Image: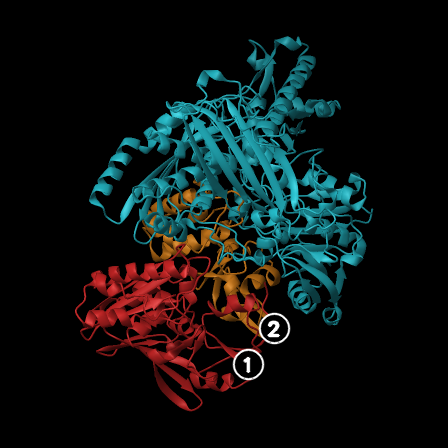
Amino acid sequence: MSILGHRVLRTEDARFLRGEGQYVENLPLEAALTATFVRSPFAHARVTGIDASAAEALPNVQVLTGADVDVPPFGPPPFPGLDARMGRPVVARDIVRFVGEIVAIVLSEGRAAGEDAAELVAVDYDPLPAVVGTAAAAKDETVLFPEVGTNVAALGGAPERDESLFDGCDAVVSGRVVSQRMAACPLEPRSAAAEVGPDGRVTAWLSTQTPHQDRMVLAGMLGLDPAQIRVVAPDVGGGFGAKMLSVEEILVVWLARRLGRPVRWTETRSESMVALNHGRAQELSFTIGANRDGKVLAFRLEIQADVGAYPGLGAFLPNLTGLMSSGVYAIPRIETSSRAFVTNTTPISAFRGAGRPEATQAIERAIDLLAAELELDPAELRRRNFIPKDAFPHTTASHAPYDSGDYEGALDLALRSAGYEELRAEQRRRREEGGPKQLGIGISTYVEITNGIDETEFGEVEITADGGAILRTGSFSHGQGHETTFAMIAAEQLGLPLEKITVVKGDTDSVASGTGTYGSKSTQIGGSAAKVASEEVVVRAKKLTADYLEAAESDIVLDPALGSFHPAGSPSQGLTWAELAARAADDGRLAELTVAHEFKGAPTFPFGAHVAVVEVDIETAQVELKRLVAVDDAGTLINPLIAEGQVHGGVATGVSQALYETFTYDEDGTPLTGTFVGYAFPSAADLPSWEAVEMVTPTPRNPLGAKGIGESGTIGSTPAVQSAVIDALAPYGVRHVEMPANGENVFRALREAKA
Amino acid sequence: MIPAAFQYERAGSVDHAVELLGGEDAKLLAGGQSLIPVLRLRFARPSALVDIGRLDELRYVRDDGDRIAIGALTRHAELVRDPVLAARCALIPQAAAHIGDPQVRHRGTIGGSVAHADPASDLGTILLTLDAELVARGPGGERTIPAAAFFTGPFETALAPQELLTEIRVPAVESGTYLKLARRSADWATVGVAAARVDGRVQVGLTSMGPTPLRATGVEEALAGGASPADAAARAGEGTDPPADISASGEYRTHLAQVLVRRALEQL
Amino acid sequence: MTRISLTVNGSRHEADVEPRQLLVYFLREELGLKGTNVGCDTSSCGACTVLVDGESVKSCNQLAVQADGCEVTTIEGLAEGDELHPVQQAFHEQHALQCGYCTPGFVLASVSLLAENPDPSEEEIREALDGNLCRCTGYHNIVEAVQAAARAGA
């Protein structure tokens, strides 16, 4: 019986349940110094002096500043159009550009001493006007990089508007979605440790999503041969796109080499809230045009992206947003453009969805506004515009090559699961009664892109002398359960029980290559690499068996239930994996049963439909999410239990953008939400249970038929919830509510509508 | 983050605590739920902490007939399940059940919370609404401070540097309720309203509508004049100075106060 | 330095501690019990939750000196050898953990909840867990795990 598609409990759970998780902060490292970073309290200032004497008067304390650190600037990444002069000094020298930028490094014995000393480092700042928000940045009155002369970090898409884009449209509607800045908030703050071995090689233990890529970046930044660096990512407590190498990890490794002693650092939460990259921060202005039957003819999307003080991945993400601007609809004419600006804020990078939530938020809002304009039911308007199920593969007018999809099927399933007609009836009843608690229903239909930049992943299967298997993967699970899922894939191919398969990941010395885990790509490319490598191992095992049994290779079959190879028709004459491996080991042929594979995957396009039901107290402006029905189709599901867990977590984050979280600054660039007290990360008491509904439309683009699912829940849920709130308030004349669509923003929308 | 260093003394009795508070720049440590977060972020750096957490003689709820005496070190979780309060002054357990989260409630004390005097805290508003009496012990002996005189500013009370709260006395109420709205379940109140009928008079208090908990005197006046809950509630904003912050604007807070006062009065 | 004496997971410990040392760092660094995690600095996230005299307490929000004379249970003290505590087992069976960082705190908060309320409703569970944050699971399976543990008589 196939193990694939079964809700198999995770094999990695024991250590986490027992408190034996190997997070970097937990790893013993003898004689390590603690690094504490002194960070700027100003968003924009000249640094005119640093006096470390009081700090260094404390026992065993040493302070380094930018002048001591000979490491080149970090970034910008090699995206076209980014100005190299906008690179980030790993330690600020003459100028700081965001609250939290590093100005000095304290080395101490232990954390308490580090904090005591860091407080005593006296830094003289000469504040400059702070640029906060893209509107201020666009004025170029204060520029962050005077040599560059503008705050524009990147431009993308159409250089100018096609004024004829909406010719022939009977209805043209415009609007704007602000996809507000969010903080990633992995529960484990970042942690790094580094030690130089007696052979001069440095080992870096990092709380990261990308150990192999980090090694390459470290090598480049520190002028080393990658072979001189080992990166170990042990257990990592969540990443969500934010945990990819940054200046702190580079500094920890540099310090270990410079000081000749191991060095370790763990950020505090309030440090992480400003020092770990943020996500989203796009303003999306759109115009949608349709004929009077509701057939969409044209869509324009203009993105203003805030990339923070130093352009990174955030400057690239608007390209993904533009690519996915068509959503699930067949839109003949699409024009997208983007402008990315630097501001005196935390740099923006990937965060669960990374550019695709923004695209979905824009197109879904546009469709809802169009539905209101045409007085059509929002579900009906969507039906009239879906790319039909039989039209795949389909390339959108925004150049996205969709593989497979059944958007109408997803919508039907979601509406049926939600009991849509009953919900509308309940809404009508409450409206007639006129009580304070009114219902709102929101729909979203979405498609997203996973493995969006055609990446390759490494997988190696090795049969051990006792007939078990080691699967080495370049993917790096930090909560996604690969130790179970990938083992299931190998177990299926090899005919070995799950317990006999060990998944190895995260250590660049143990796994030859890898890209890590982000962008919901790991199952489809890492899992496919594991599958293909396993298949080839089986081919090799058949050959070995044929040699040992003196049979023809083509006669040998694998009985997966028993894990034995035998001539077809003669099951009793077979060799089990253990027997085969033992013999091969004796003969010096065991190495034949190790196969590595690099699987290059094309992008795939998961899709779905979400229905949100909110109850809005019209008097208090408080919103409670009552239900969230999520249909998420990610093709073949290897382990539906784990896939569902990904949807649950993704939905919670998407809902939270709609109703709770926003990272804000005052006009001086001082963060207002820099702790978990101010930043509205919700608990279980603030959220309902989820109704995740399974749907499977395989993709032809990889041997598993699998797409990614990690970000789908986030992408689908935000627009459904925002839409539901607006729907609840429609009778009061409200046409839009900014996110978080709760409390103050709802109050304001009601007030303005009354005015 | 780690607190800055401090001296530590454990008080063996209330009088011992008073004596230890005479030392320079000393702060009381009860449950620690308000103090330790402040120390961790180094917003305060006292030279010494006087730990009164083990003075179990200050943990009690006593039925004194028309009044209830609550020992200052009674924990929020104990207030929640106390049968005397449930029967005679139910708005206290009602509010205590929503202070922070369960872990905070297992350790946080009524005295600690009230002496911390965060204008966003619930118990202070209730004590003010009930015209509670706060008993303090200092080097000069014991004195009773009426709630109306206790809260002097944000995080400021009428307690002298060498005084500690030992007991809080509240009246038994005919009826009472505490309504609290917050962004998230474990957050401090965006706005909170306490309403109670005490000796035939309806008294109303507000959380997060000014630098201290406030009595809604306009509302009380309207009610005394026979106004309906809705009409009385319209005066909820009188005399208030609601803060504008990341949770809410002043205008929204005033609006919430009006709505919650009306609802609280309707529940009495 | 202040001398403290406390029982942790059934074993007695005596130590001299700096008064400012938080209980969580005492457990992690003096006793080597690394299962209790630090997730924030405002006592918001609950990853540091332990039991003190049977009640859930955030160990980042207590000084080690406050635990003098107390009985502390950390995540390491729950299982009996190979046998997981029913709450741990329920978390496993309901897939209530992903990265695992918040898990010890949630497990102990749940143990404390069920000790006080052995048959909680979904709403009661969610409210009782509002001192614990998770970014991975969306809480759904954690609630299911507590319900399963309650049914199993945990």
Kindly identify which residue carries mark 2.
B5
Q: Nearer the viewer, residue A635 or A383?
A: A383
Kindly identify which residue carries mark 1.
B25
Dot 2 and dot 1 within a common chain? yes
Image coordinates of residue B147 in percent, x first then y, are 34, 78
Q: Is residue A161 above or below residue B174?
A: above
Q: Nearer the viewer, mark 2 or mark 1?
A: 1
Q: Nearer the viewer, residue A278 or C97?
A: A278
Mark 2 belongs to chain? B
Which residue appears farthest toward the right when viewing the image?
Answer: A199
How many numbered marks have been drawn onto this rendered protein structure?
Answer: 2
Image coordinates of residue A630 in percent, x first then y, are 41, 34
Chain B, which colour? red
Residue A497 visible in rendering: no
For the colour cyan, the matching chain is A
For the colour orange, the matching chain is C
How was this image coloured?
Answer: by chain
